[in-house]
Structures are given as C-alpha cells and as structure tokens.
Image: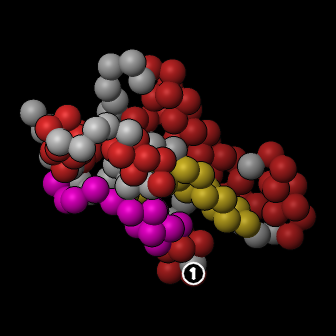
Amino acid sequence: MKKFILGMISRGVGNIINISSIHAVQSRQRFGIYAATKGAMNAIGRAAAIDYADKGIRVNTIAPGLIMSDNMIQFVESYPKGTERDNIIKVMDEAQLLKPGKSEDVANAALYLASDMSNYVTGQVLMVDGGASITIRF
C-alpha cells in the first residue's frame, strides 16, 4: 500500500485489495505468528479505508480459506499414496461447508473488488472460505 498510495492520492482515485487469510479470524495450533500477521492485514485494511476514503481510495481485504493452490497440492502429494494421504484429504474436505477452493475463486473475488460493481464497498474483509468461518467442524 505504501508504494502505491501516493500515486492514488495524486490521481484522486484508487482501489487497494489486500490478501490475508481465514487464520485472521480463526486459526489452529502452531499458527500464532501467521494468524497475527493476517489479523494485522485485516486491521490495516480497515484503518486505511478510514484514512483514505476522502481521497477517493477504497481498501478491502480478501481472506481465503483452504485453497488448492500449487503449494497445497504439493503438500498433499508429499504424503505417500494410501491411508495417510486419504486422511489428509478427508480432513481438508471436512474443514469447510463447500469443497476446497481453487485459486480462481480468490481471483474472482479480487475481480469483483477491482470492478465498478464494488464501488460502494470499502473497509471490508471478504471471506472466500467455503463457509469455514461460519461453522464449527469437529
């Protein structure tokens, strides 16, 4: 944001989209620092939306849940085929209401926030998490 905000101020218009994570609102053991940094991203997005709205700049954040990115696919494939990998896939499938997301799901959310369809949206965190943040899954 720091690199681009001055240009946006001089033009009198801008649109910032940050990417955080579901871990900003709910996390797991051993994810403390990661969760803290993502929570900070959500907070700075809200604060920047307040600070720069009068300059014509909108600021929003996308918080993805389980996305089957190349890294996540490599993580799953790092487990040997069979029961161990099947168990990891089962846990991932049950982590949210919908099936795990794809990178395109996050990209589509960004396209919405970048488009004129979201001209009246600022300071928001858009959860792109297949419903994981609205339910407790045991």
Could you tell me residue 6's position as x and y percent?
Answer: 87, 55
Locate the C terminus and report the quarter of the image it occupies: top left
Question: Residue 9 or 70: which is nearer the viewer?
Answer: 70
Could you tell me residue 53's position as x and y percent?
Answer: 67, 58
* Residue 62 drawn above or below residue 89: below
Q: In this figure, what is the number of numbered marks?
A: 1
Could you tell me residue 12's position as x and y percent?
Answer: 81, 68
Q: Is residue 51 magenta?
A: no
Q: Residue furthest front?
A: 81
Identified at 51% across, 44% down, the residue is 20
| Range shown magenta | 97-110
Identified at 59% across, 46% down, the residue is 45
* Residue 46 drawn above or below residue 33: below
Q: Seen in the image, is 108 located left or right of residue 99?
A: right
* Residue 110 drawn above or below residue 51: below
Q: Residue furthest left?
A: 138
Colouring rule applied to residues: secondary structure
Q: Is residue 106 magenta?
A: yes
Q: Is residue 25 visible?
A: no
Disc 1: CA contacts within 10 A as few (<14), some (14-19) or many (>=20): few
Asked which secondary structure carries label 1, the reply is helix
Identified at 50% across, 28% down, the residue is 34
Residue 76: image quadrant is top left
Q: Is residue 49 visible?
A: yes
Q: Which residue is mark 1?
A: 116
Could you tell me residue 8's position as x and y percent?
Answer: 81, 63
Identified at 32% across, 33% down, the residue is 26
Residue 84: image quadrant is top left
Identify residue type, mark 1: Asp
Question: Residue 51 or 108: which is nearer the viewer?
Answer: 108
